[in-house]
Image (cartoon, grey):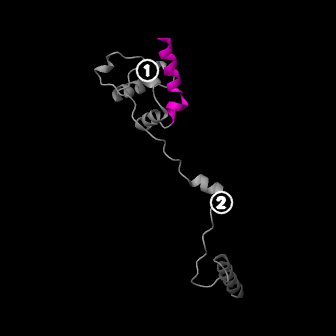
Amino acid sequence: MVYIFMVTIAGVILGWLLRGGCEERGTESKPQQATSSQAVKNEEKPEPPMSAPLLLSEEEGKIRDDLTRIKGIGNVLQARLNTMGIYRFSQIAAWSPAEAAWIDKHMSFPGRVEREAWVKQAKLFVAQA
């Protein structure tokens, strides 16, 4: 019985110490300031500026390049690009960073255009033509 009483008292004291001990009641502890590395981690990267690239109508896109020659573009992505109005290497070669960001956002593949160097590859194909 004495043992149970001692364990209970020890638990109460331990709980009291873990909750703040002798601090005045009714005062809340101040939140800690975030360190600069935590602040950088928690900051969201600003969205790059975006603008729509030159998009052709289906009529204008009758003359089409085989966009699957660009590494990273398969049949499915070529069909999606064609649906958007992109049919030629010259269109992709002319993309600015803002236009590439617009394509990334509208194709749900963030960073893919830059990572797979679509613009650079398209410029090479335009130069070969």
Residue on which the image places disc 2:
35
Image quadrant in which the N terminus is located: bottom right
Crowd around label 1: few <14 · some 14–19 · many ≥20 (10 Å): some
Residue located 67% across and 84% down the image:
22
List x then y, in percent, for residue 2: 71, 88
Crowd around label 2: few <14 · some 14–19 · many ≥20 (10 Å): few
List x then y, in percent, for residue 5: 68, 86
Residue located 41% across and 26% down the image:
76
Q: Magenta part of the protein: which range?
A: 111-129
Dividing the picture into quadrants, the one containing residue 34 is: bottom right
Residue on which the image places disc 1:
90
**Is 57 placed left or right of 88 in the picture?**
left
Amino acid type of the residue that numbered disc 1 sits on in the rendered structure? Ser
Element under disc 1 = helix
Q: Is residue 67 above or below residue 96?
A: above
Residue 100 shown in magenta: no
- Front-lying residue, 75 or 34: 34
- Front-lying residue, 6 or 22: 22
**Is 31 placed left or right of 61 in the picture?**
right
